[in-house]
Image (cartoon, rainbow, N blue to C red):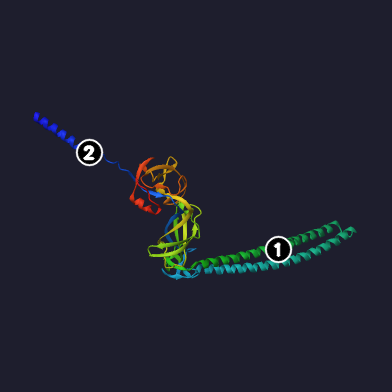
Amino acid sequence: MLTAGVICLLLIIFMVAYRVSEQQAGGPKKQELTQVEVYRLQRGDLAKHISLTGQTVSDASITLSPKYAGRVTAVNVELGDRVKEGQILLVQDTEDLDIAIGQARAEAEAAGADAVTTQAGYYADFLKAEAAYDIQKQHYDRQQYLYSIGAISQDTLDSARDQYVTAKAAYDSLANQSEGGGTPASVRSKELAAVKSRYNVKALEKQRSDMFLRAPRDGVISYRNAEVGGYLTAGSKVLTLVDNSHIYVDCSLSENDAAVLEPGMDVNVTIDAMGQDFTGKLVFVSPAMGDDSKTFMVRISLDADRSAIKSGLFARSAIDILQKKDTLFVPKEAILTKNGRTSVYVYDENTGTVQEKQVTIGLMNDKEAEIVEGLSEGELVVTSGQDRLQNDMRVKVKETAAKQEDSAGEAGES
């Protein structure tokens, strides 16, 4: 037991002596400094890079449908056919309409003849009534004179007055129809009936014309669903015409990007599927956000006719917008926001320490933020590791960051 105790005591003395000698040999360990990256604040032009992605859109893609139901008697196009504006693409049966048009034309002619007959009869009746009125008026005037001298009785005078009143009423009835020199009402009614019949003919002729489905513009047939002998219902999709003579690119953008875009800007568009670049122009920026997508729609017009470009291809472009000339800005990763307070850490090259400074930011883009107040040109702003920093803390600038700042001056050391 005594031997064992001596051995343990010797081991403890040995371990303590080893640690003391190790510390004396190596000395105290140096504390590692936090490494950061910095950015030297300089004046420059603040620009916004806007990436645009979307799909190619044809100048027109029109679904063609029959206006009326009917049986197909001819289909004059196949898939891929190029057609001209006004060309007849499909024909429906018009036999029943041809019969109806013939009947309507006969009715219109009959109505016109009836109007002529009515007019002739009216003027004949008017002249007859006018003559009868003049005769009865003269007769009544004579009977009044005879009655005044006692040559006739009261009954004879009353009979003459009755005949006069009747003749006058008949004359006035016809005369009032053309009061003011216009067409008599009875004649006008017949003329309007004739006009209505002619309009009925035009309506049937228009319906017959609509049984011939025509191309509304030049283009290519991209869809066909009709065969001779088939029956089409009104409004059913039978043909689609695509006009690729001009191509657009439609893109969706956030409100921040759409706010700085204006029609007329020149852009370059890349269509990856074709491996080609095309020049274009911004022709439309949506004035309001879409209710469903919550984005703004932007349309780019490719400059030249590109009939070889298909609709629906993925396209991309980019626009660089100058936001402000000759201003101070820092990388966005340098900005700290806490409790509504915006600040950055600034590196002091003389002391090797950092200080937090409150700043006011202005315009922003995807990478930078404008500094309106709080910093001066030439200061070094910390862009990494801020979560480990405190005021007056000594830090070490990474070599890679220092090399990036060589063009602006030496970044400093610990």
Residue occupying the point 66% across, 67% down? 115
Name the residue that disc number 1 marks: 184
User: Dot 2: what SS?
Assistant: helix
Residue occupying the point 22% across, 40% down? 25
For residue 5, what is the image quadrant?
top left
Q: In screen coordinates, is 165 left or right of 90?
A: right
Viewer-side residue, 200 vs 248? 248
Residue 39 in sight in this render = yes
In the figure, 23 relative to 81: above or below? above
Name the residue that disc number 2 marks: 24
Residue density around tag 2, few if under 14, some if 14–19, many if 20 or more, within 10 Å: few
Q: Position of residue 272 (x, y in %)?
A: 38, 62
In the figure, 141 relative to 369: above or below? below
In the figure, 198 relative to 380: above or below? below
Position of the N terminus by quadrant = top left
Viewer-side residue, 84 vs 173? 84
Outermost residue toward the right? 149
Viewer-side residue, 333 vs 147? 333
What type is the residue that disc 2 sits on?
Answer: Gln
Disc 1 to disc 2, C-alpha distance:
135 Å
Residue occupying the point 44% across, 55% down? 50
Q: Earlier in the sequence, mark 1 or mark 2?
A: 2
